[in-house]
């Protein structure tokens, strides 16, 4: 039994989604996903974790598809709409998916999906059949694969079971007091946890309403804010930066009042600068609740719903999540103000990295998952200080591997050597900086480098700055970066 889906059946004729003004009820979500599940099953009784990829825009069809795959017993692989052919091919071959679901009306370039041994299935064609008996599923069943970058050049597939996903949701519903009267705007991408779990599945689990806006766009969001009474809001820090920039120019006081009226505004996926926290509070009166999470573990730490929310801190462990800090020798740190790696344990922690048993094993110590994030505790609250790897970049809330960008750069025959590092940026948190040495003194400017990388990488993975030694920060991180790119400039 998939507990999330069972529960949402109770909300029957209540509106679950608003998409371009169209209201979609919970019953309709179920009937459509039942049909999709039936079609996917064909003659089979159960898909037994068959990997099924999908590339569907963030509207109601996304949920029919996700739930349809789950109900048929398959393993859902939501892919990024901005991915390039190489990136898609990599994920599809890594998961060994034989079917990918797409929509006829989607703007996705379907020629990107002409991949060997892959059946392109249109969701519209899945509506023709009758509902079959759907399988009864164990909660340990693998449910979803999300691709996340790390210290390897290619992203890893994070496999979560239904139980993991359920555990991630119930914790948040309780901690953030989701109610059936809540209404949330959804504009985050739906191939990552922040969008899928926090913005979409938590409200649906509680019978609340989600307005699906596609991607983030200030004008569209403002229009919807004026039409709807949103009560909950969750975003990455870059979105708050854009909101502040736009609201500075916007004289619509009513819009600001709408933000003021919400019961909860949250930030996560990257550090929210305390100045941004303050600016937002000065403008709207809202004290942003910052929390900390990761694809492998869902959400782990959160400032309180009721109680002191401290700017620059990510709060305390969520219910049922165990968190500890360890020093370099694997000893638990209990003292305040001492930095150590964050380790996590709990039912929400993922099952495995797809096809990578050794990597899975290496990322755990005695069933504690090693996040690679460094934190300290001050007056009981966790503060994220950074990461233990220089090769991980967080930009606009996306985690990116420096090695993946370096790989793409090195495919260019003009490039002899390169090093990619994160450069602090007030809007994006970090931007991607590339130090490049060309062959035979060839010239390459930023535009050319971006054009080159754009062949292989999504837009948000493009280098935004070409670096020389003077661009490196003068702090200790700058020294580490120098080590990485040393030799390039000598
Ligand atoms: C785009 N641009 C950038 C970047 N991305 N410039 C620098 N750095 C970047 N990373 C440029 C584009 O080329 C374009 O330039 C201009 O900025 C606008 O691009 P656009 O894509 O339209 O930007 P946007 O719509 O404002 O999008 C920003 C965004 C988006 C809303 C922050 O990146 C986003 O949705 N990020 C969320 C990612 C996410 O959900 N992460 C959660 C992972 P030009 O104008 O010249 O063309 S899950 C996670 O982290 C864990 C579990 C957790 O804790 O949540
Ligand atoms: P991802 O792998 O895309 O799920 O990104 C997870 C990573 O985002 C974590 O390991 C952290 O490095 C970072 N992260 C998430 N939330 C926060 C936060 N509130 N402050 C700082 N970093 C965060």
Image: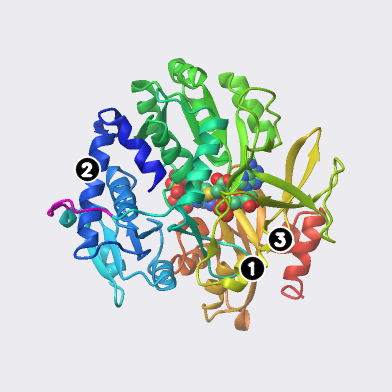
Q: In the rendered structure, which segment of residues is drawn in magenta?
A: 127-134
Which percent across, then down, holds residue 218? 42, 34
Magenta stretch, main secondary structure class: loop
Q: Earlier in the sequence, mark 3 or mark 1?
A: 1
Real-space Cα separation, disc 3 to disc 1, in angstroms: 10 Å
Real-space Cα separation, disc 1 to disc 2, in angstroms: 40 Å
* Residue 74 vs residue 303, the one in the foreground: 74
Real-space Cα separation, disc 3 to disc 2, in angstroms: 43 Å
Q: Earlier in the sequence, mark 3 or mark 2?
A: 2
Q: Which residue is mark 1?
A: 361
Instruction: Point out which mark residue 88 bears.
Output: none
Q: Magenta stretch: residue 131 in it? A: yes
Position of 253 compared to 314: left or right?
left
Callout 2 secondary element: helix
Which percent across, then down, holds residue 41? 24, 61
Residue 324 higher or lower than 27, as above or below: below
């Amino acid at each position: 039994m998939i507990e999330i889906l069972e529960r949402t059946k109770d909300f029957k004729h209540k509106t679950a989604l608003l998409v371009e003004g169209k209201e979609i009820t919970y019953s309709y979500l179920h009937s459509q996903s039942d049909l999709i599940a039936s079609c996917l099953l064909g003659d089979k009784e159960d898909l037994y974790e068959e990997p099924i990829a999908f590339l569907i825009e963030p509207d109601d069809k996304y949920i029919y598809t996700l739930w349809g795959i789950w109900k048929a017993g398959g393993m859902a692989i939501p892919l990024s709409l901005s991915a390039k052919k190489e990136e898609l091919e990599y994920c599809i071959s890594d998961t060994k998916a034989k079917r990918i679901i797409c929509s006829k009306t989607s703007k996705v370039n379907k020629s990107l999906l002409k991949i060997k041994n892959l059946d392109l299935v249109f969701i519209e064609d899945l509506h023709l059949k009758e509902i079959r008996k759907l399988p009864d599923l164990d909660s340990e069943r693998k449910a979803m694969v999300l691709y996340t970058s790390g210290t390897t050049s290619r992203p890893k597939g994070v496999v979560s079971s239904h139980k993991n996903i359920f555990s991630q949701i119930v914790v948040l519903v309780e901690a953030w007091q989701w109610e059936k009267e809540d209404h949330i705007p959804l504009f985050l991408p739906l191939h990552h946890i922040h969008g899928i779990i926090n913005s979409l599945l938590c409200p649906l689990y509680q019978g609340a309403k989600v307005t699906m806006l596609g991607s983030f766009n200030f004008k569209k969001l403002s229009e919807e804010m004026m039409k709807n009474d949103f009560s909950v809001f969750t975003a990455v820090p870059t979105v708050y930066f854009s909101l502040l920039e736009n609201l500075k120019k916007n004289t619509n006081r009513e819009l600001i009042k709408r933000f003021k009226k919400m019961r909860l505004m949250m930030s996560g996926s990257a550090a929210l600068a305390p100045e941004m926290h303050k600016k937002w509070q000065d403008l709207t009166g809202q004290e942003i609740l910052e929390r900390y999470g990761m694809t492998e573990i869902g959400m782990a730490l959160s400032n309180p719903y009721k109680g002191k929310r401290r700017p620059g801190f990510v709060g305390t462990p969520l219910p049922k999540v165990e968190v500890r800090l360890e020093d370099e020798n694997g000893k638990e740190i209990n003292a305040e103000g001492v930095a150590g790696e964050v380790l996590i344990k709990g039912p929400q922690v993922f099952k495995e990295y797809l096809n990578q048993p050794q990597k899975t094993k290496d990322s755990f110590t005695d069933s504690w998952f090693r996040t690679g994030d460094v934190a300290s505790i001050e007056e009981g609250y966790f503060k994220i200080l950074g990461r233990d790897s220089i090769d991980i970049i967080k930009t606009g809330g996306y985690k990116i591997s420096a090695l993946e960008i370096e790989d793409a750069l090195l495919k260019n025959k003009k490039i002899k050597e390169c090093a990619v590092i994160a450069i602090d940026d007030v809007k994006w948190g970090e931007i991607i900086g590339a130090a490049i040495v060309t062959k035979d003194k060839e010239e390459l400017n930023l535009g050319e480098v971006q054009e080159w990388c754009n062949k292989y990488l999504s837009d948000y993975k493009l280098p935004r700055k070409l670096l020389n030694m003077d661009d490196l920060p003068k702090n200790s991180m700058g020294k580490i970066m120098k080590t990485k790119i040393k030799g390039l400039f000598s």
